[in-house]
């Protein structure tokens, strides 16, 4: 069987990206609490991203960001204005 990238997956859902996700999680853990998106809103943002055609293996094809990073900072917004 051929290994295929998950098209509409977040980094936390892709086992083959485990090393990159650990780095991503370390960065997320360092976001100041005052800048961090509240957990419920964060999960809502990620749910929206998972339904978006621009999501490809944890990254936004529109802007190139890791959606989990962009969604984690409250003042950030979706580059295509979905949240």
Image (cartoon, rainbow, N blue to C red):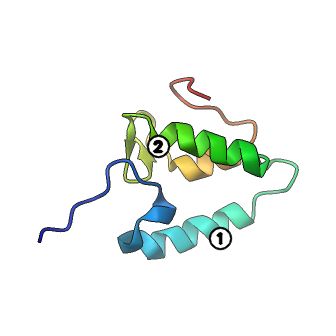
The residue under label 2 is 50
Residue 30, picture quadrant = bottom right
Residue plotted at (85% across, 55% down): 33
Mark 1 neighbour class, 10 Å CA radius: few under 14, some 14 to 19, many 20 or more? few
In the image, residue 27 lies at what x, y percent? 65, 64
Going 53% across and 47% down the picture, which residue do you hit? Answer: 67
Please identify the quadrant where the N terminus is shown: bottom left
Task: First in sequence, mark 2 or 1: give its number.
Answer: 1
- Mark 2–mark 1 distance (CA, rounded to whole Å): 22 Å
Quarter of the rendering containing residue 61: top left
Residue 54 is situated, as x and y percent measured from the top left of the image, at 39, 35
Q: Are marks 2 and 1 in contact (CB under 8 Å)?
A: no
Taking the spot 22% from the left edge, 61% from the top edge, the residue there is: 4
Q: Residue furthest left?
A: 1
Q: Secondary structure at mark 2?
A: helix
Graded by Cα atoms within 10 Å as few (under 14), some (14 to 19) or many (20 or more), the crowding at tag 2 reads some
Taking the view exactly as shown, the residue that stands out farthest to the top is 81
Number of numbered discs: 2
Which mark's residue is nearer the viewer, 2 or 1? 2
Taking the image as shown, residue 52 lies to the left or right of residue 6, namely right
In the rendered image, the vertical position of residue 35 relative to residue 6, given as above or below: above
44 vs 33, nearest the viewer: 44
Query: Horizontally, is 71 left or right of 35 in the view?
Result: left
* Mark identifier at residue 26: 1
Q: Quadrant of the C terminus?
A: top right
Residue 7: x and y in percent read 32, 49
In the image, is 2 to the left or to the right of 30? left
Label 1 SS: helix
Q: Nearer the viewer, residue 50 or 25?
A: 50
Residue in the picture at 19% in, 68% down: 3
Q: Which mark is residue 37?
A: none
């Amino acid at each position: 069987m051929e290994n295929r990238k998950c098209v509409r997956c977040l980094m936390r859902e892709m086992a083959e990206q485990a090393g990159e996700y650990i780095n991503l999680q370390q960065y997320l853990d360092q976001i100041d609490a005052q800048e961090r998106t509240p957990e419920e809103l964060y999960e809502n943002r990620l749910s929206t991203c998972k339904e978006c055609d621009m999501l490809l293996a944890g990254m936004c094809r529109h802007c190139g960001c890791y959606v989990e990073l962009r969604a984690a900072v409250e003042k950030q917004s979706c580059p295509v204005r979905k949240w």
